Amino acid sequence: MSSLFTPAIAGALSLPNRIVMAPMTRSRAVDAGAPNELHGMYYGQRASAGLIITEGVATSADGLGYARTPSIHTPEQVAAWRKVTESVHANGGRIAIQLMHVGRIAHPDNQPAGARIVAPSPVAAKGNMWTDANGMQPMPIPEELTLEGIRATIEQYGQATRNARDAGFDGVELHSANGYLPNQFLSPNTNRRTDEYGGSPENRIRFVLEVFDAMAAAWDAAHIGVRISPAGAFNDISDPDAAITYPLLAAELAKRNAAWLHIVKPHAPHFNHWAAIRANFPGTVIVNSGLTQETGAQLIESKEADLVSYGANYISNPDLVERFQNNWPLVAPDPSTFYTPGAKGYSDYPAYVG
């Protein structure tokens, strides 16, 4: 399994190994959207990863949708995130922040006063969302973003990138997957616009590219990666044109020298456009696919991926790199604590003791 432990490059970042901690919502931001001491401990414990990518972090109040998720748009939030990056760096790690705007995947009970639920088109998502105030609630019909609203949202991504740099992050990932706002622009079932942001695949990728450009202008492209889920259906997303949309998006991101492309690769027989995406993005590719140590190494050795990311295994194994290196047993996570507040199931998983 030595391929997992060789150095790698992701844009401007030099990484000591090819194991990435995947972004995972953990719902521990109980202090006005700011991270706290638990976040610093949690991420600091996992600093041996080649790269940590944080949970999705909102670019604005409008970008929030779930209970107890963090933001990075106020000075207090930036200062709190600085303590998190300092914890990771003190332990020798590298950490990128994932910037996330949920779009229509939201409920007012989970947002501060005055926030809006916005999307490319006024189409409600199927399903319900947990709220601390009132339990499970249906997601409402979102407001359609005006052209002025789109420009303002894009600038929020740029400002959040500047905030992330000020907070000491090593890079930024644009969350354009899993049914959130950028993915909503990419997908025709959620994007029913007839202007320059809707219709053809070329128009539907425009928002993602303009957001990336704003983020790159705020820092530089070598520090900006993008996450996509080309065949995903999570959060009521559907794109029958995915075989066109995602290779096209990959090619445009390659032209912009994105630091990495982080791909949620499904195990699905209809997912037949992987090769075109990989061919159109010759830069650093991270693959997330429910991987084991063995399947992750195989992806790297076959050159399907340059880096591989692990989610659930990182929840319960803060020393995942060392466990892989030494063939130590893995601890199974407790799903009942994935999204609960407090240290239990978050920062209380110990490193391996033989």
Image (spheres, rainbow, N blue to C red):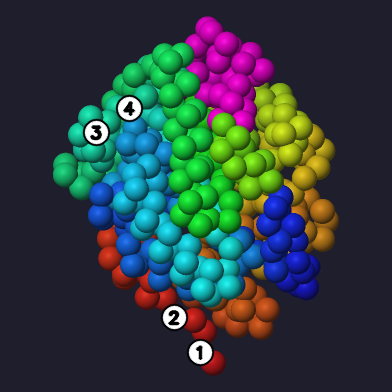
Which residue carries the number 4 mark?
Answer: 117
Task: Sort mark 1 into few (<14), some (14-19) or many (20+) by Cα contacts within 10 Å.
Answer: few
Q: Residue at x 53, y 69 (%)?
A: 89
Dot 2 corresponds to which residue? Answer: 350
Determine the residue located farthest toward the left in the rendered image. Answer: 133
Residue type, mark 2 in image: Pro
Q: What's drawn in magenta, residue-wise?
A: 185-213
Work out how far the residue at label 3 is from the one at label 1, CA to CA, in angstroms. Answer: 45 Å
Would you say residue 286 is visible in this rendering?
yes
Mark 1 and mark 2 in contact? Answer it, CB < 8 Å.
yes
Q: Residue at x 49, y 81 (%)?
A: 351
State which quadrant residue 52 falls in.
Answer: bottom right
Separation of marks 2 and 4 at Cα, in angstroms: 39 Å
Residue 154 vs 225, above or below: the answer is above
User: Callout 4: helix, strand or loop?
Assistant: loop
Left or right: where does residue 178 sit relative to residue 76?
right
